[in-house]
Image: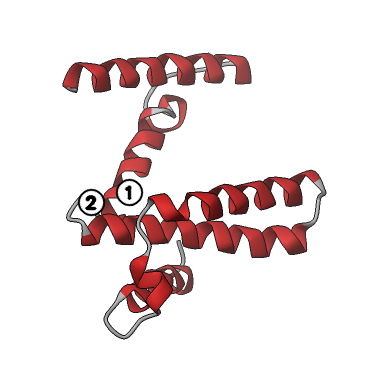
Amino acid sequence: MNNKMGKLFVELVEFCGTLRGPEGGMWDKQQPHESLLPALKEETGEVANAIKNKDTLNLKEELGDLLYQIIFHPRIAEENDDFKIDNVLKGIIEKLIRRHPHVFDDIEVSSTEEILENWKKIKEKEKGNKKGRA
């Protein structure tokens, strides 16, 4: 990630904190996860529609709206002492590394099908480990 992109990401996270903070927006401060579900579904659908319609201009805008939803939820979770955005970022990076052993480990593959089969096996193993921890 280049420095400018990183700064913009941090700026968006901080912006969300401002909207949720003492001087922030009344509506923004009152939202729990559950009240944001309709907006999350709507934004996800709008991204999908932009992709289906090959509307890259709209896709750019809708991805921004969806990204904000993705920033908003960890902010609420942080306020509830559940987790932080850092945990979300670290978790997805670790998951993607685990699920790409052909890139980050010494696993050799010869086809996309083999990659998808490995992905499926790794995901099933992860789900099994989660059930064991629960």
User: Mark 1 or mark 2, which has the lower sequence index?
Assistant: 2
Image coordinates of residue 10 in percent, x first then y, are 37, 71
At 53% from the left and 20% from the top, the residue drawn is 115
Quadrant, the N terminus: bottom left
30 versus 115 height, above or below? below
Image coordinates of residue 61 in percent, x first then y, are 66, 65
118 versus 64 height, above or below? above
Q: Where does label 1 land, which residue?
A: 88
Q: Nearer the viewer, residue 46 or 124?
A: 46
Looking at the rendered structure, the kind of residue marked 1 is Val
Image coordinates of residue 53 in percent, x first then y, are 82, 48
Instruction: Count all numbered tags in the image, as a single digit.
Output: 2
Image coordinates of residue 6 in percent, x first then y, are 41, 68
Q: Residue 100 carries which label?
A: none
Q: Is residue 109 left or right of residue 111?
A: left
Looking at the rendered structure, the kind of residue marked 2 is Phe
Mark 1 near mark 2, Cβ–Cβ under 8 Å? yes
The image quadrant that residue 24 belongs to is: bottom left
Q: Where does label 2 land, which residue?
A: 83
